[in-house]
Amino acid sequence: MSGGARLSICATLATFLASCSLLPLVDKSSWLLEAAILLTIQAAVGAAARRVPLARPLTIGAQALVSLLLLTLSFAREQAIGAIVPGPEAFRYFGMLLEAGGDDVGRYAIPAPVSDGIRLMLVGGTLVIGLAVDALAVTFRSAAPAGLPLLALYSVAAGLSEGGADWLWFVLAAGGYLVLLLAEGRDRLSQWGRVFGGTGRGFGSAPVADGPGAATAPVRTGRRIGAVALGIALVVPLALPALDGGVLGPSGSGVGAGSGGGGTISAVNPLISLQNSLNQPEDRTVMTYRTNAEQAQEMYLRIVSLDEFDGTAWRPSVRPITDVPSTLPNPQGLDSDIRRTEVQTNIKAADWYTQTWLPMPFPASKVSIDGRWRFEKVGRTLVGDHGETTRGKQYSVNSLVVQPTAQQLANAGQPPANVLKEFTKVPASLPDVVSRTALQVTQGAANNYERAVKLQDYFALDGGFTYNTDVQTGTGSAAIVRFLKQKEGFCVHFAFSMAAMARTLGIPARVAVGFTPGSASGDGTYTVGLRDAHAWPELYFEGVGWTRFEPTPTRGYTPEYTQDTTPSDGSSVSAAPDESSSAASSSAQPSESDSCSVQERKEGGCASTAPALVTGSSDDGPPLGTILLVTLAALLVLVVPLLPMLWRLRVRALRLGSGGRTDADVAGRTLAAWREVTDTAWDHGIPPDDSQTPRKAAARIVRLGQLEAPAADAVRRVATAVEQVLYAPRPQPASGLGDDARRVHAGLRAEVSRTTRLRATLAPRSAVRVAWAVAEHRARFTAGLRARWSAARSRPSGQES
């Protein structure tokens, strides 16, 4: 293996090991395999470009171009030309993904979900670092500075992670860097041959050349330098301030594990704990509660609202938080003439259920709970401060059961300007089909209330939608379009689609995530299980405030104010919905029959796998096999037409490279330079004539190529050197033959047309020698087989070969 190939492998390995330090930052590791494959392809392109050889800037440019094509294939193939060539639409999509990824990094706690934006940042960042390391260590043969991008990669990961295994990632990154340094040292030593070790130990002893074993001295010195560097790297961080807080959050601020008081919600994923719980293989009990509400079907236990939609995912906005007041402020937009009833609910969370956000009825007016909790006013949610969770918590919530009439909702006034601006915002990437469908569905509606009811009925009753948990998860624009076309999905699809369509109609909308009321246990207690997790839209009506709607068919409870026949006042409804009205999570399995008792649910007798509820697209890109096949196909399409040019560049570099110093080497180098001159003339339209002597052939090239003095003299000098090699008893070495061949090349290009120059570069005629060589090799091989076959047939029987 050549030194360059060894260095390239070590550079790729060093980048891969350093990128492993990013694993604790996210909840899935599939991105690392994708990054490793793309990193290997990037390194292979660099190795091929250096072997041609291309100029250093061109080598780096080729690697960057292939990396861009690979990223386009993985992330923006639908927006690209031919699924791989990026155009303006693909670059806009990249920008949108990076912006969404930055928002995700700023909001989610570690480990964050691998959304498309975060995956692009991880994979793309690894490729950028890999390109820098490969360029420094291999292309420019300077491995020591290559440690800087590796250090940058590790530093980002170490500054953000909160785990106790940081030393492991440091050892991996440092090990990769040391391997790279040792590979470069070995490559440099191999270029010197036997290493001069200096004077002997004795006084006045003569210098001697060390044997092979003496080469270990520089290697040993390199190891010592590496050990000192690692020691410094381990000691220096102890004197530096520690990085604390959430992902890209300020030290000591935000909400999450650590010290300090939080002022904003900046690093909390409201669904991480819920997602982990929903992945359990059985429908475990999440919480139990008692309430004095007359109609328990309204007791939705809300966790958080997702009020920001960027085209890729719905997520909670970054907002200020305060201490929990003794009495929560009046709900936004709720007037005094709207009928309301205050109820009290006592809730006990399961010992295994760990959720940063506090599930409680909406809108809460008072919360009594122990521990460190903070209040977010706009979403009316409570969030645990610095590691506080719901695990085993018992708490009491006073909440309002708001009962507006359909007429009050229909007469709702114009929302405040700030509410209208923030909660009707839709991304520019939202396809037009979403707004067109919203207009078609709500045609004929006289006000926003009627439009909202028409949207709800479209999804739940009239639109032909079916509830199906087996469809592909997703919440972005593409998922909404797919859902409207296929007309099947689960609560996430229904809630997110209705909220997006309401916003296109100018109705302020957001999405709430939490649990439906659960099931009555018979002793006045209600049990909420994993399958009761749910998502629903909330729409804003001035005078009423944020109002729940239920577009998911066969799940949840449809509010009375949206039904055609509203029960009279004082009517009683059964305590709580059973399994048929329990909300499934974004990916919970369909509910079992009513015969499945609460006790059976607790014991897992009705268990079914409940995949995770997510706020981002779960599309992790195309399969790795598809990436490899398409990448190979693209490389073939791009490289095959360039093979003649690449072969010609490689042959020219070999012919004009440095040679040995023996007579045979001198002869071979001279003949190679002459062959290069004749092939260059051939590429520019002067075919070779092997029947002529070198001197006559040179005169012919000068005449047909119309060469001026410098190039003409160069041709004659090369021809004279060839004659010496062919006819002189002891040929004398001629210097500057490579430079003469290059002068001939420049002179011929200057005298021909642009078309001829382009053909000489991209489709050189002398490349036919490859076909001739293959044919000659095949002929020799065939002749050899025939000779061996004839010898075997003519051998007397019993004679050994």
Image (cartoon, grey):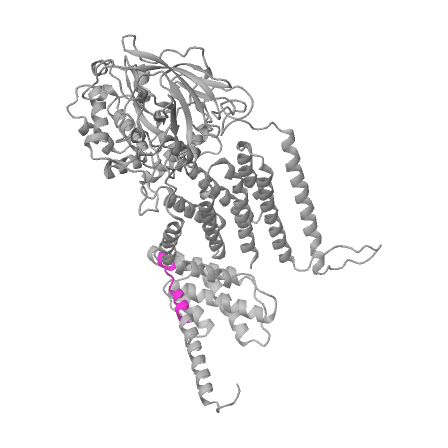
Q: Position of residue 121 (x, y in %)?
A: 44, 37
Image quarter for residue 687?
bottom left
Image quarter where the N terminus lies is: bottom right
Q: Nearer the viewer, residue 52 or 302?
A: 302
Residue 235 figure quarter: top right
Q: Nearer the viewer, residue 708 or 24?
A: 24
Question: Which residue is pictured at 43% across the width and 67% down the height?
Answer: 678
Is residue 592 visible from the viewing direction of this image?
yes
Apparent side of residue 377 relative to residue 81 in the rendered image (left or right): right
As drawn, 798 above or below 430: below
Q: Which residues are magenta?
A: 757-772
Residue for point 42% across, 82% down? 786
Rendering coords of residue 344 (x, y %): 38, 15
Give the x, y percent position of residue 656: 51, 62
Magenta span contains residue 733: no
- Relative placement, left or right, of 76 versus 405 is right
